[in-house]
Image: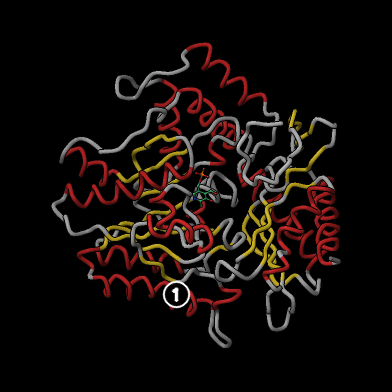
Amino acid sequence: MTHIFPRHTAMRPPRAVAGDGCYIIDSTGKRYLDASGGAAVSCLGHSDRTVTEAVKRQLDTLAFAHTGFFTTDIAEDLADLLIENAPEGLDRVYLVSGGSEATEAAIKLARQYHLERGDASRARIIARRQSYHGNTLGALSAGGNMWRREPFKPLLVDMSHIAPCYAYRGQADGESEADYGRRVADELEAEILRLGPETVAAFIAEPVVGATLGAVPAVEGYFKRIREICDRHGVLLILDEVMCGMGRTGHLFACEADGVSPDILCIAKGLGAGYQPIGAMLCSGEIYRAIEEGSGFFQHGHTYIGHPAAAAAGHAVVSSLLERDLVTRARTMGETVKSALVERFGQHPHVGDIRGRGMFLGLELVEDRETKAPFDPARKLHAAIKKAAFARGLVCYPMGGTLDGRSGDHVLLAPPFILEDAQVEELVDKLSGAISDALAH
Ligand code: PLP
């Protein structure tokens, strides 16, 4: 008997009772290697005492002070730390409680920035197909994940969706990577011109696409071209690093690898590392000044923004990432995991692509490696892999609809950065067994 409203009504999940490094332990004592950090959350594993002590200290000092009345030392310290390490031009931090809140705030800030400057016609948002920006209605409107959108379509705001940068499937035969990147980036310019540049507020994209595509980075040069197009037309660039940010890809901010700075950047997940719910929207000094010199008021806010206990977790996590050089570890350990995946699955008849950056990796499953034909979606291979992996004591994040929201299957891996060599072997063994189990049915 339970009064919990679960994600699926038929779900009878085990009770998680403890965390131990890269493992979650259930009430029967079974240990699960958390190879996806839940959903790219637990970058420090499940028992980091530095973070839990920091949260406890904060709670013992001050649990809550509403941002309508106060600021706090810990929120100030976290904002300073983020900006010290942020891409060039970012200057202000708006602390929220998760990823969807960060992208909602970003979309609204983009609109208000243009309004403050007297550009009232700029209200259109352009995003990409096969993307995810959160489940609240504004974020869902921006997202290009068709099955997530479908039931709520009548409630969503009309936004444009251009192609993702997904070379495994999008790059044409004989087309260079650079030409492919330019072709798909140029879809942004075509859409801006179609809508009328004076109506477009912002473009939003994930630097490395997470759950929807399975750890797909853009090809080199793509985001530089996107940045140029945005600048040419006065369109703000919002980068959603909710999943791929905070060291996950081997850079504290994922866009460092792409050589661009956004106007607005969203982070969450790895910022609190699961120790507290926290997200943040970072914006440029120029955007902040437009508000400061205009109405002086960002017309937004939630009760729990800037929560001290959440800020304490965020500060302890980012400090740990920097002081323990865990971002470098995410890069090097990510290479180790990727090599192990290539060794085990590189010739697998049903693994078409192994991709990703740092500790953010994906495997795409195909019926036929030559033609890249996906499995019949009715087979729900991704769900079968998730179930088989879980039975073997492995948490990973498989998803379906990789191609178009309907067909295609992939497995997303986002292990804690503290993963050790022996656990790489365990991860690959269990995943291999799970894929075999799922294919056998
Ligand atoms: N943006 C991206 C890229 C995400 O992957 C997610 C969550 O998976 C979100 C936004 C929404 O974050 P949250 O679930 O914390 O609201």
Of residue 342 and residue 221, the one placed in the foreground of this image is: 342
Left-right relation of 124 to 206: left
Q: Position of residue 305 (x, y in %)?
A: 40, 30
Q: Identify which residue, 200 or 359, lies in the foreground.
A: 200
Name the one closer to the observer, 142 or 316.
142
Residue at left offset 55%, top offset 84%: 172
- Quadrant (top left, top right, bottom left, bottom right) of the N terminus: top right
The reply to whether residue 328 is in sight is no
Picture quadrant where residue 83 is located = top left
Q: How many marks?
A: 1
Of residues 394 and 421, the one nearer the viewer is 394
In x, y percent, where is residue 156?
Answer: 38, 56
Q: Secondary structure at mark 1?
A: helix
Q: In the rendered view, would you say 327 is above or below 96?
A: below
Q: Quadrant of the C terminus?
A: bottom right
For the residue with label 1, is its CB less than 8 Å from the closest atom of ligand 1?
Answer: no
Q: Residue at x 41, y 72 (%)?
A: 185
Residue 435 in sight: yes
Residue ID for mark 1: 184
Compared to residue 387, the image places residue 227 above or below, namely below
Q: Position of residue 319 (x, y in %)?
A: 55, 31
| Left or right of residue 258, residue 45 in this image | right
What percent of the width, then of the height, locates residue 381? 73, 64
* Crowding at mark 1 (Cα within 10 Å: few <14, some 14-19, many 20+): many
Q: Is residue 138 left or right of residue 295?
A: right
> Which residue is pictured at 39% across the width and 26% down the height?
76
Residue at the (16%, 50%) spot, across then down: 117
Going by the numbered disc 1, the residue's amino acid type is: Val
Residue closest to the far top: 60
